[in-house]
Amino acid sequence: MKTVKVSGKTVEAAITKALDELNATTKEDIDFKVVEEPSKGFLGIIGSREAVLEASLKIDPVAEGLHFLQQVIADMGVNVEVKTQETGKETILSLTGDDLGVMIGKRGKTLDSLQYLVNLAANRYTDRYYRIILDAEDYRKRRREALEQLADRLALKAKRTGEKVFLEPMVSRERKIIHAALQKNNDVQTYSDGTDPHRYVVIAPK
């Protein structure tokens, strides 16, 4: 992260210099700290002192995350493109291309790992957390629908047999989908058991 130290007769003059050196357009594009306030000195001449400030470009978390992801894609040598979509609460980086299977991995594990790393890269320079979702041609939506269908099917099995049904280990996000899908089902109850990374959902008849 480039930081410059500049001076000027006034703070505003120093800011203008900082914008020029950082190739920024407006004051909102930079973070700056006034190191020394300007002083006119005796008779406005003797001992006068210019304003001194340190400035750096504000980091765009989404741009940082996107840059990291594009580097990973380049290093992997896969034919994948990234599209950015802002939803207000979060940013979706959607992958398209011929090699999505490699990016998604078994049951989305590679996609989840990449999403975790992208969020780390995006938020390393910011105090406010920016959430980035990594998707691949609506894989997240299709996976959610598949899990909801699985939950309904196994709930019927638990009700029919009167026995608990144990699902395979899942990440926290997917376990939450199962719990939510059966939350209003009056015939079964769900809970998680085991320890990560082998934590799983249990569907039990009431």
Image: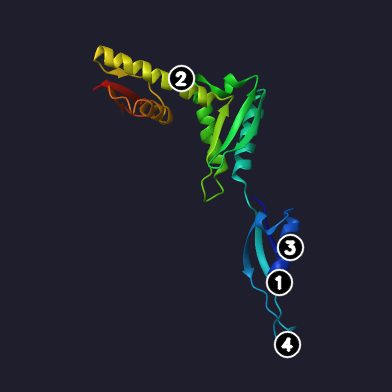
Task: Identify the residue at image location x=67%, y=23%.
Answer: 79
Q: What residue type is labelled 4?
A: Leu
Q: Which disc, if any, is residue 10?
A: 1
Looking at the image, residue 18 lies above or below residue 52 = above
Residue 110 position, x and y percent, is 52, 25
Residue 14, visible in the rendered structure: yes
The amino acid sitting under disc 3 is Thr
Distance from Cα at disc 1 to Cα at disc 3 = 10 Å
Q: Quadrant of residue 165?
A: top left
Instruction: Please give the label number shown on residue 16.
Output: 3
Residue that label 4 marks: 43
Q: Separation of disc 1 and disc 4 at Cα?
A: 17 Å
Looking at the rendered structure, the secondary structure element under dot 2 is helix
> Closer to the N terminus: mark 1 or mark 4?
1
Q: What secondary structure is marked by label 1?
A: loop
The residue carrying pointer 1 sits among few (fewer than 14), some (14 to 19) or many (20 or more) residues within 10 Å by Cα, namely some
Residue 91 in picture, x, y percent from top left: 57, 38
The number of discs equals 4
Disc assigned to residue 146? 2
Q: Type of residue at label 2?
A: Ala
Most extreme residue toward the top, as rendered?
161
